[in-house]
Structures are given as C-alpha cells and as structure tokens.
Amino acid sequence: MEECVCRQYIQILQQELVPALGCTEPIAIAFAAAKAREVLGKMPQRIVASCSGNIIKNVKGVIVPTTGDMKGIDVSAVLGAVGGDSSLGLETLTPITPAHLATCRELLSQNICQVKLLEGVSNLQIILEVYADSDSALVEVCYAHTNIVRIEKNGQVLLDVRDQQSGSGHEGADYSTLDLPDIFAFATTGDISELQPTIDRQVQYNRAIAQEGLKNNYGASVGKTLLEVYGDRVENLARAWPAAGSDARMGGCVLPVVTNSGSGNQGMTVCLPVLAYAEHLHCDREKTTRALVLANLIAAYQKRGLGKLSAYCGAVSAACSAGAAITWLCGGSYQDVCTTITNTLANVSGIVCDGAKGSCAAKIASAVDAALLAHHMTQKGRTFGAGEGLVMDSADRTVDAVTRMGREGMRSTDVEILNIMIGK
C-alpha cells in the first residue's frame, strides 16, 4: 500500500488515541471555560454556556471528574473557569484542588452560570461566554471536543475558522483514506513501530481504570456483576473489563483513559476485549499491538461518517471493531474480519445513545457480547446474508448503510431523546 496512506493511518491514530480525564462532554465544556477565562484574563463574574443537544444529553447524567459527586453543565463550566488548564486538552481538569472545588461550589450557589440550548447546529457545539466588570470573552468549540473555531474578546474577533472547517470533526488527518482492505494490510503487515508508544499508553491507561472499576464500587458495578455471575472465562473478561472501566469513568473516577473517536468509553471498548483475548492466547507484543491497531482503525472507519456524537451508540462500532480484531488474533483472514463486522452490525446496530451515564457500562457489555457472537459465528462459517435488514453484499457497504441509518434516520430520534430527558 502507498506510503502516504500509511502516514495518514499513523496520524489518525495519534489524533484519536489521546488521554481524557472523565467523560469527554463535561471536559469539553470545562476546556472551553478554561480557555475563555484565559482569554478574559480574570475570573468571570458571569458565565453563559450554550450547548448543542448532544452535549446536554451527555453531560446530564455523568459525574464531573475531580468533583466526587457533582453533575451538570454549570458544574463543568464553573469548575473549568476556576481551575482548568486548557493547554491540557481533554485532561483540562487535572490541576483541580480541594480549594478549587470549594470556590466552584460557592460560585454555583450564586448562580453565576446560565445554560442555554443551541438549536439547529452541529451535534457537538459549545459557545462559552464569560463576563467580568466591563470585559467579555467568547470561545466556541465545534465538531470535536477540543476544536476551537472562534475566539473573541470584548467583541473583537481573535480567531474565526468556522468557514474553514469541514464539519466532520476530522480536521488534520485525511479520514477519507480509511478503507477496510488498506486498514487490514497496514495493521497486519505494515510498519507500526511509530505507533507503539500510542498503543502502549492505551493499554496502560485503559487497563488501570478497568482494574479500578473491578476493585471498587462505581455506578451499578456492571463489570463486577459480570465477573461475580459469569466467572473469569476470556469471553466474560472481554465484556467485564470495558464495562468496569466505564463504571469507574462514569462514576467520577479520576484516572484518565485513552479515547477513540472522541470517546473514552469507545476507547476502552475497542481496546480491552482485544487485550483480554491477546493475553488468553499468549500473543506476543507485536501481534497484540497489530490487533489493537486493527481494532482502532476499524472503529475510526465506522465513525467517520457518523460524527463524534449522535443518537447511535458508539459502543456498537467500538465493540464491532474489537470483535473483528479478535477474529484476526484467532487466525482469521481478511474476509473473516469483514464477516465479523457484518455479523455484529446485523445484530445490535439499533442501540440508541441516551446520554453518558452508568448504564453505558451495560451497553458496552451487550455490544461486546454481540461482537463475540459474531466472531464465533464467523469461525463456524456462518453469516447473515445480503438483503437481511441493513446487511449489504459487503462489509464496507453494510457499514455505509448503518452509518446512513445512524446519521440520517436517527436524527429525529436524537431530538426526541433529548426532549424526553429534559422533560419537554
């Protein structure tokens, strides 16, 4: 395959597999608030956080990291303004101290933050306005969680690249180069040495938070329940590890994770089932790394047309990608990998995203279970046929069909989910 395509794949993974502290939507708000405070040059006296529906949906039910038990857009915005560091990106809240939390609670009691719904905008959009004395600043984030498209101070435009953005959230690397044959060739035979530190970090961070989720009680303890009921067979570890990581992450754990497609839950779901099988099969470091490269790229391939946020549950595409990589680890061919993708999407591609919260762990477990069923069906030469629902005559066309369903068909579903969640 062409060297330029290999370079794009390396860039895509380096762009996607980044550390994040806590759920990425509260962090995106905190990031924007921290940046707005830095532009303002002083602590805001008033904050207006205007967010798209999908941001509101994904912040409503999840604990803001470092707070212990606090939830909400106002918490995310005020805490980011009080003690966040925007230079840390998705780890903006890492510097938060007990003193910052005390200040945050005091400011929240004063109702300094107003929250507004942005309608008719990108699924991922935040406009953070801050005011102090006669000064003001504005920071707009759009398409991706730390992608700043506009900065203003006292009405003066300091940055405005809104017209230069594609709207895909994929600025930088060329995601149009992603296709299944090239992904498979690169992951299984290409030079992946440059990606070793990126993959090692994903394994280290995501394994650590999974262990934390299994050791302590977070949320509904889905991961712990799976181990207690079903034991430590590899099929169950593949479900329990990412579920436990999600338990911890949604429950306010301060350990970072490494993301995929802008999501820590998806990053764990792509990585940890593959890791469970690699250890079970006693795979060496290179084969394990190649399997993880394969899983991460297939996930990015599936999500490129959906966008970072939608009504379509990202755990499905992440688990599907992990199942495909497990099939390869177990000796499967390129066609077997494609069959696993098709079998998974034929099963659970209708799971909806109703926001980030504790039940994400259960959806992860269900999606991984479907991916493992798909894997075992593939091993036995069984598959769903073209024309059965959204199943097309090839894996890539099936992915296209599911992407269209998630992007276009579930648009009204997304609106209705938000209306239900906010009591409208």
Image (tube, rainbow, N blue to C red):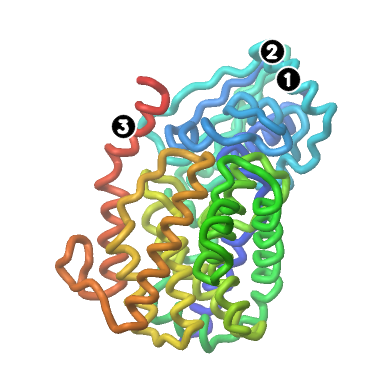
- Looking at the picture, tell me which residue is in the foreground, 350 or 145: 350
Question: Real-space Cα distance between discs 1 and 3?
Answer: 32 Å
- Residue type for callout 2: Ser
Please say whether residue 267 is visible from this viewpoint. no
The residue to which callout 3 is attached is: 416
Question: Real-space Cα distance between discs 3 and 2?
Answer: 31 Å
- Residue type for callout 1: Arg
Q: Is residue 405 left or right of residue 57?
A: left
Q: Are marks 3 and 2 in contact (CB under 8 Å)?
A: no
Q: Earlier in the sequence, mark 1 or mark 3?
A: 1
The residue to which callout 2 is attached is: 109
- Residue type for callout 3: Glu
Q: Are marks 2 and 1 in contact (CB under 8 Å)?
A: yes
Image height of 34 relative to 303, above or below: above
Residue 319 placement (x, y as % from top left):
45, 63
> Callout 3: helix, strand or loop?
helix
Residue 243 placement (x, y as % from top left):
55, 54
Q: Dot 1, crowdedness within 10 Å: few (<14), some or many (≥20)?
A: some
Question: Real-space Cα distance between discs 2 and 1?
Answer: 6 Å
Labelled disc at residue 105: 1
